[in-house]
Image (cartoon, grey):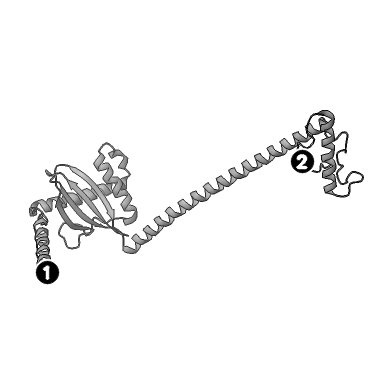
Amino acid sequence: MRKKLTCLLAVFACILALTACGGTTAPQQEEIDEDIRNELFSIAETTVQQMDTVVTSGLVEQQKDNGVIYAGLQSWESAKKETGEVDFSADTDGNGIADCFEEKTITVNDEGDYIVTVGVTGAQKTADCVVTFNKDISDYVSIVTNVNYTFSELMQQAGMNTILGMGTTFAVLILLSLIIAAFGRILTTASRKKAEADHKKEEEEMKKSGVFAGGASAPVAGSLPAGVSDEGQLVAVIAAAVAAYRAQTEPSADPGAFVVRRIRRVRGR
């Protein structure tokens, strides 16, 4: 028992050692010089003000040739509908940075590009404008503006998306079921009409061939032939008439080689 316990402890210790050896520490973020940080924040804030001027002037479409700038303008224009107007002139502490800005973070990605995040406060909501510069800070890599929503607003949006998605799905299913039901009715009606037409054609052919000759005549609507008191007798009379007709026209035919499947009363016109 002691040997088993010792083996289990040894295995457990090996597992812990392997876990410790396999772990890696997160790389430290490269320290950015304070002058470069100030320059990056300043350029990002100026970029936001310039984008707001272009959007307010209605000149967004004139920047189509520059894909990055055009995408950034569209993102800012969409976000501004929710943030409301932004006051870039107020500077209560006199530090040269407008009160609407909040300098948040600057990080460097694997390619060495600088990712600058600046908070912007509008009349209605706040947003984060993320401006990415190349490592030489000579050009933009991307510009994206993200509106900040509260938890309740995010839940409302999720609920609306769920309702719209489920509503659309059920609407499509109901529409498909109605279409299938309509096709079923159309096919059923067509089949019934074809069956009635075929039956009518058969009756006409039987009348032309004189099926009722030599025995009983065709029944008159609303009455039975003389001497016939009920439907059973009428069926017997008609069957006898058919047998007599077959005996006259086909003497060699077996008189019992037919089956009366249905007899329907013909209404008078």
User: Type of residue at label 2?
Assistant: Val
Q: Is residue 55 left or right of residue 2?
A: right
Tags 2 and 1 in contact by the CB under 8 Å rule? no
How many numbered marks, from 0 up?
2
User: Furthest-bottom residue in view?
Assistant: 2
Q: Residue under label 1, please give it.
A: 5
Q: Which mark is residue 163?
A: none
Label 1: how many residues lie within 10 Å, few (<14), some (14-19) or many (20+)? few
Tell me the quadrant of the picture where the C terminus can be found: top right
Residue 269 shows in the view: no
The x and y percentages for residue 66 are 25, 38
The x and y percentages for residue 192 are 68, 41
Q: Is residue 164 left or right of residue 98?
A: right
Nearest the eye: 235 or 171: 235
Determine the residue positioned at 86% across, 39% down.
218
User: Type of residue at label 1?
Assistant: Leu
Tell me the quadrant of the picture where the N terminus can be found: bottom left
* Vertical comparison of 259 with 84: above or below: above
In terms of image quadrants, where is residue 213? top right
The x and y percentages for residue 109 are 15, 48
Q: Residue under label 2, please give it.
A: 260
Nearest the eye: 203 or 187: 203
Nearest the eye: 99 or 259: 259
Determine the residue positioned at 12% across, 66% down.
8
Q: Is residue 16 left or right of residue 260?
A: left
Determine the residue positioned at 21% across, 55% down.
118
Q: Secondary structure at mark 2?
A: loop
Label 2: how many residues lie within 10 Å, few (<14), some (14-19) or many (20+)? few
